[in-house]
Image (spheres, helix red, strand yellow):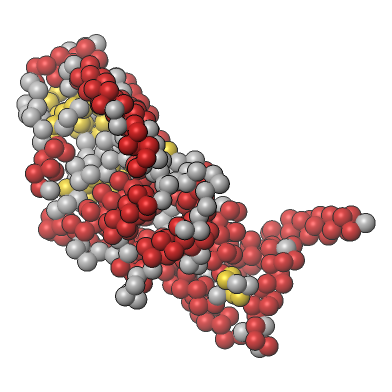
Amino acid sequence: MNELCILQDDVPSFPNQVAFNIIEEELCQPLEAVFSKISSQTIAAASLGQVYRATLRTTGEDVAIKVQRPEIEPIIYRDLFLFRTLASFLNGISLQKLGCNAELIVDEFGEKLLEELDYTLEARNIEDFIENFKNDPTVKIPRVYKNLSGPRVLVMEWIDGIRCTDPQAIKEAGIDLDGFLTVGVSAALRQLLEFGLFHGDPHPGNIFAMRDGRIAYVDFGNVAVLSQQNKQILIDAVVHAVNEDYAEMANDFTRLGFLAPGTDVSPIIPALEAIWQNSSGKGLSDFNFRSVTGKFNQLVYNYPIRIPERFSLVIRSLLTQEGICFTLKPDFKFLEVAYPYVAKRLLTDPNPALRERLIQVLFKDGLFQWKRLENLIVLAKENVAKMSSNPALQAKDMQKSRSLQVERKLDLTDTIKDGARLFLIDASIRRQLILALTEDSKLHVRELVDVYRLLEDQIDIPSVALEVARDFPTVVRDLMLSWSESVLSDR
């Protein structure tokens, strides 16, 4: 594995003069006119390009210059043609074993590879990531200089970070390892479940630990996009895993495109249950993507499952990042970090669709899950505590900046407002909540008190009451509309 890591940023480089000529051709001016200083050796060299460190003459800022290998495009086209020709002889076997055309696999691979050759596309990807993480002070995305970039040259802000697979250097820099892992997993999950735009190649050469505790990403040539529908289905799958509803999880596979529409999912349900349930009773705390992927591979061969190209990137991305986490902390437990993020998202996200998922989690077989609500609150508070203790949030300039979302407490204001609205307007929710409070012919006052105690240090009661009061006219209007609609429908 160490030898293969060399391929990430230590491939033999091409001559400096060739690289400098390409830079001058793209910028249409001499190097000396743009850069006051440029490194005589490459900082990193990979299969498609290599990187130099330079200083801008106008501002004195340090930048990274990414230069594409000369004549690489015709070589890639030639290799893709050869692969596709070979794949045509394997179509029959591929259709039988994988359920898809072998040439299609090559085409999907080739499409992503050719996207990496266009540095103008990568510059746009960087701008999208900057926009997504603009209010997150724990993530650093390098600024791109589009006026100094072109199809073969990309100039971006220099990232002075620590390689993320060097735990000793990270500790020596005074960075809390657990806190950094929380930041990294939260950033990955935000890309996947919130933005739908995620880094497709997060290998150790592309992720760094900043000395102030932030995580930094570089190299955005390979990114993938998930639709809003797919993001919601993934969240559904998480909810179904929490609820141990494997029949619905199997249906999620059909909705995501892993199974053809109309496929009988009943034989897959026991297999999914075997994957997610640990037979020795250890539970999901020992979950890791490596073991699940190994078991899932057996499903691919035993059932008519085909992994869509966008999800092959998701799986590879998560596996790679989990591998980095294991390097930093060998006993790393993914769900111990991921579940607190998911819990906080379910409890605080303003998206109405996630409110529905929260209700699904809190009700099982018509019964309200008091213990599950307590666990969600505890986990969400844990995520907020770990994120807020990150050194990146302690800097004075971060504390003063109002544009950055620094969460010191679990903000449930919107959730409480929505809950009050639903209680007044939605008769079925109102009935379920009343039944939850009077289950087994008794008032569940103790459970309410336990939930309140968990939240009393997080909620500013006067502020929440003020917000609810402000929203009261809207609630009354919606209540009247709901009542009038029910009267009209009855008549």
Image point (80%, 57%), residue name: 482
Locate the C terminus and report the quarter of the image it occupies.
bottom right
Pick the residue in front: 385 or 401: 385
Image point (26%, 31%), residue name: 156
Q: Check the image and report above or below for 205 versus 187.
A: above
Report the residue that reaches farthest toward the right: 491
Q: Is residue 171 visible?
A: yes
Image point (37%, 40%), residue name: 96
Q: Check the image and report above or below for 16 versus 315.
A: above
Pick the residue in front: 345 or 113: 113
Q: Quadrant of residue 132?
A: top left
Image point (29%, 19%), residue name: 150
Residue 153 in the image: x percent, y percent? 24, 22
Q: Is residue 51 visible?
A: no
Residue 276 in the image: x percent, y percent? 39, 64
Pick the residue in front: 468 or 258: 258
Q: Check the image and report above or below for 187 versus 92.
A: below
Residue 17 in the image: x percent, y percent? 9, 17
Give the left or right position of residue 182, taking residue 483 as reference. left
